[in-house]
Amino acid sequence: MEKEGPITELKETSPDAFENNRKIEELKNLEIDEDDEDEDNVDNSNNALDAIIKEEDDDEAEEDISIYSSQHEEQVDELPIQNVDDEDQIPKDSEAQIIGHDDDALLGVKGNPTGDESELAQQSDGFYKAEEENRTTIESSSSSREYVVEGQQQNGLFHKLKEENRSTEEQPSIMVEKAVALRNFVRQKSMVVVSSMMRHLSRKYEEKVMPATNNFDDNKDSEFKKEVCENNNNNNDDDARESNNSNEGSQQEPLAVKGRVILYTKLGCKESREIRLFLNRKRLRYIEINIDVYTNRKKELERRSGSDSVPKVFFNEILIGGLSELNALDDSGELGHKIDYLVSDMPSFEAPLPPFSGEDDAACSGAIDELALIVCNMKKSIVVRDRFCKMRRFTNCFVGFEAVDFLSQDQYLERQEAVEFGRKLGSKLFFRHVLDEHVFEDGNHLYRFLDDDPIVASCQNIQRGIITTKTKPIAEIASRLRFLCYAIFEAYVSEDGLHVDYRSIHGSEEFARYVRIVEELQRVELWDLSREEKLSFFINLYNMMSIHAILVWGQPDGTLERRKFFADFKYVIGGNTYTLLAIQNGILRANQRPPYTLMKPFSAKDKRLKVALAYPEPLIHFALVFGTRSGPALRCYSVGDIDQELVDAARTFLKTSGGISIDYSAKVAYANKILKWFSVDFGKTEVELLKHVSNYLDPNDSELLLDLLATCELKIIYQPYDWGLNS
């Protein structure tokens, strides 16, 4: 009984050593069965070994060893090793502790006041040697094995596995960074490729013919570039001198004056054209009042000058007179004093006023359309929203039965009578079916107001809302349009028709009146127009529509911009949309394919096909102007003389505008690209094309061309087309 106390106390003094030996024995058993276990058991054993090694490393780093001894050291005969299963037997921190030891000997012992110190040291040395042997056994067994961590084989100690596990955890973030960098790289390169392709298609880059031989060195290449630049500068200077001499200072900026210059003119007056040129040479801006356009100003002119003869020029409230008076003042030198007066003095209240918006404009007047008022009330009363029909989404629609309910209540009609009244409104193009399947029916059919149609809303001649004035006949609108074209072309287009003053047109009251005229085309009927009326109306509309597009969108620069210019600038006419492409190829060319396309403008079910000409008219290509330097001259066309005017336009284009020129000695014909693009309208072969063109040449040139075609083969060279603005 006396020996059990000390032995029990010694068992309680070394629980850490006992616990470590127990774990080592368990680890050895795991190593024996490790080859038969799967990867999950290997991971678990790795974690266990890692925990043990961590504890061992922490003990070595701190170099602290804790052992426990009993208070009766003289009774200790041996150090038995056994497991401590009871938690109550775990020693407390207040018991004996050895601090600071070496592998060979203990440096100091605390808590052993009596007993044989050498015997205790010897037993502790045996304990540490056994522990060291176990550790070396574990390390050798671990170093001889290969552990697989996330697909990578690593040899070595367990603490290296921890570092490599940490590196494998960082791999996803590295992969994300690489993916982001790769995405940014691909995006940047794709933007470069797309932009270069767009520049190539749009022809925004400038090509210069440079020597491509590799034998030239850098010095010769630089000298050649300098010579090219010097030649270009010299040519530009010569061109500038010629243009300045020809225009006599018209390219200079106008004078900044406080006063106002008013010019009274009328259509077809040659003296009025001469006065315009005179004022431009003197760098004077003027406001033109055409008494044929503004009829009420004729009485004002007679009251101010004593007669209604034109042209008349006013400097503020002072009457200068006509062309002869201006020349006399210029010769005497008094005109300079008059101009100084304009520069310094503001116009008085007695001076003639510029035309105001809507003055004498028939488009701003007219009877009120009662049907339009009913439609306006219906639009306010029924629900207009996005709806689905036949697996499609339609915006801004209303349901047919709701419209019938409104009409029956608002107009006090029976339901069938309301349906008939709705069909009448639909035939007047106030609204239409979203799929254009019928005019109007009662039920869950979807309809859309004309100005709510997304395609129609993108047109340039439609206002937001419903026009409440009665729709005028197309013949009346076409007549006013033709008259306005005469006034605009005479005032703002050169005498040969090849140069247009777009800046002055944009700020003129005539152009504002034109915009109001084309707004009346929304619900007109085109079905009853004759061939001559269609030719006259659509040619004049095409030319003014091109000017409108240039003023709104600018001159197209490149292939893609030109495609948008011709295919996207739209007017709504008679409830249908018309582009420049549709007017030229669909209406005037009898629905022929445009150049370099596979589809016709109008399908077989297109309502616009009823408006198209029965057969193509080839002479329209000498009358349609879309703002280019290589195009025909700009002029207005009437209904009665349309055929003769088209023949005159063809002769003018082929003779003076560079349409075709023939070198009889070289047997070569130089032709405009328009003849190539639309060659199918003139003939199936180039010989038929030249025979057709010969009809509009001078008799001598026509006879020589026909003889040359009969005797030999003539070569045609198509000249590059100048897409520059005809300003």
Image: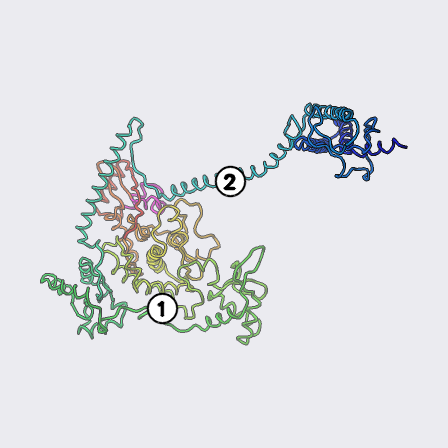
Label 1 or label 2, whichever lies nearer to me, is: 2
Report the magenta residues as a range.
672-693
Give the x, y percent position of residue 714.
28, 37
Q: Secondary structure at mark 1?
A: helix
Give the side of residue 693 with respect to residue 199, left or right: left
Q: Residue furthest front?
A: 114
Name the foreground residue: 554 vs 181: 181
Going by the numbered disc 2, the residue's amino acid type is: Arg
Give the side of residue 195 with respect to residue 359, left or right: right
Quadrant in the picture for residue 533: bottom left
Give the x, y percent position of residue 303.
20, 75
Quadrant in the picture for residue 645: bottom left
| Residue behind mark 2 | 183
Q: Residue furthest left?
A: 332
Q: Quarter holding the N terminus?
A: top right
Main secondary structure type of the part rendered in magenta = helix
